[in-house]
Image: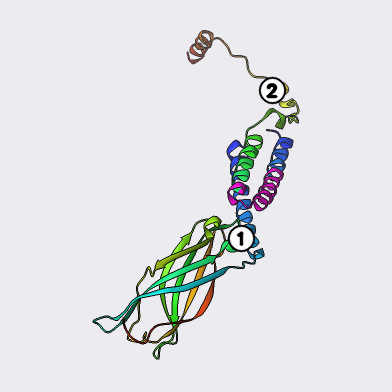
């Protein structure tokens, strides 16, 4: 998840939970049912969880582009020599 | 830091905080309800009235209890506990309360009732003060909410009396 995705996910979470709470409370109060309030809010919480917790693709529309490294070009990796050749040279140097 | 479990934790914490707030608001709405309960109790018969061997007076009554407590129920009410107490004054104590009957009302439909019953709990005085005694029958009730504070109230019905002689 990129930076913009994190911001979006957190805002979505807060707004959705508050909205479900308002809907659940007013519905429960009007229907005279505490149970319905809890059920609506529980459903809303699960839905919010499904939308904002997993790393969905739409949270990744602003990828962070790193600059190319200059150091890597200045110091190229040493070439790996075949092991047999390396052993031979070291032996000769000790003698 | 911003991982799957970090987001799950933040969501659950916020959800529970809001839930607590909703419960507090539900308990506040209880104060908007102004109950107008009604109750009527008759002593239909004095079954017997005696002095126990240890000197305490005991009486058995048949009671007709009618009450309408439907207006005490709100959406935040779990149940209503109701009990009927005999209240009288003796030289030693200014208030004696003897619980004669009680019941739990689990729903609004059952809050309007009329029953005839003998006293469920024994009506015994601690002494020998019941002959010719004037007493009140008081219907007490406790409204038990799902969340928030419990409300208690009562209706006092005066003007009951016991006979002068044992029978």
Subunit that carries the residue with mark 2: A
Q: Nearer the viewer, mark 1 or mark 2?
A: 1
Residue A81 is at least partly visible in this image: yes
Contact flag, marks 1 and 2 (Cβ < 8 Å): no
Placement of B51 over or under B23, stated as above or below: below
Placement of B157 over or under A11, stated as above or below: below
Left or right: B164 as drawn, with respect to B79:
left
**Residue at 76% of width from left, 28% of height from top?**
A67
Taking the magenta stretch, the answer to whether it contains residue A13 is no
Count neighbours of disc 1 (C-alpha within 10 A) and say few if under 14, some if 14 to 19, many if 20 or more: many
Left or right: B54 as drawn, with respect to B115:
left
Placement of B38 over or under B167, stated as above or below: above
Query: Circle 2 sits on which residue?
Result: A75
For the magenta stretch, what is the residue range? A15-37
Residue B11 is at least partly visible in this image: no
Residue A77 is situated, as x and y percent measured from the top left of the image, at 64, 19
Under circle 2, the secondary element is loop
Count the labels in the image: 2
Under circle 1, the secondary element is helix
The quarter of the picture where residue B33 lies is bottom right
Which mark is on residue A52?
none
Toward the viewer: A68 or A39? A39
Toward the viewer: B7 or A49? A49
Residue B3 is situated, as x and y percent measured from the top left of the image, at 61, 37
Query: Circle 1 sits on which residue?
Result: B27
**Residue at 72% of width from left, 23% of height from top?**
A74
């Amino acid at each position: 998840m990129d930076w913009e995705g994190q911001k979006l996910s957190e805002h979505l979470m807060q707004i959705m939970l508050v909205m479900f709470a308002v809907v659940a409370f007013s519905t429960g109060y009007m229907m005279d049912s505490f149970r319905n309030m809890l059920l609506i809010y529980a459903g809303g919480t699960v839905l919010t969880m499904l939308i904002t917790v997993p790393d969905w693709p739409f949270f990744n529309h602003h990828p962070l582009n790193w600059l190319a490294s200059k150091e890597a070009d200045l110091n190229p990796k040493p070439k790996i020599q075949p092991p047999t050749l390396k052993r031979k040279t070291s032996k000769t140097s000790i003698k | 830091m911003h991982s799957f479990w970090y987001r799950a934790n933040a969501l659950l914490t916020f959800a529970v905080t809001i839930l607590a707030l909703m419960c507090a608001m539900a308990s506040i709405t209880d104060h908007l309800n102004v109950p107008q309960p009604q109750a009527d109790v008759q002593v239909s018969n004095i079954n017997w009235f005696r002095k126990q061997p240890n000197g305490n007076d005991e009486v058995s009554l048949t009671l007709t209890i009618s009450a309408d407590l439907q207006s005490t129920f709100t959406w935040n009410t779990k149940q209503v506990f109701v009990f009927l107490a005999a209240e009288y004054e003796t030289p030693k104590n200014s208030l004696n309360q003897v619980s004669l009957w009680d019941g739990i009302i689990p729903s609004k439909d059952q809050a309007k009732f009329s029953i005839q019953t003998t006293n469920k709990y024994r009506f015994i005085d601690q002494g020998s003060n019941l002959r010719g005694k004037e007493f009140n029958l008081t219907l007490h009730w406790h409204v038990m909410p799902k969340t928030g504070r419990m409300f208690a109230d009562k209706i006092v019905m005066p003007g009951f009396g016991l006979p002068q002689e044992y029978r």
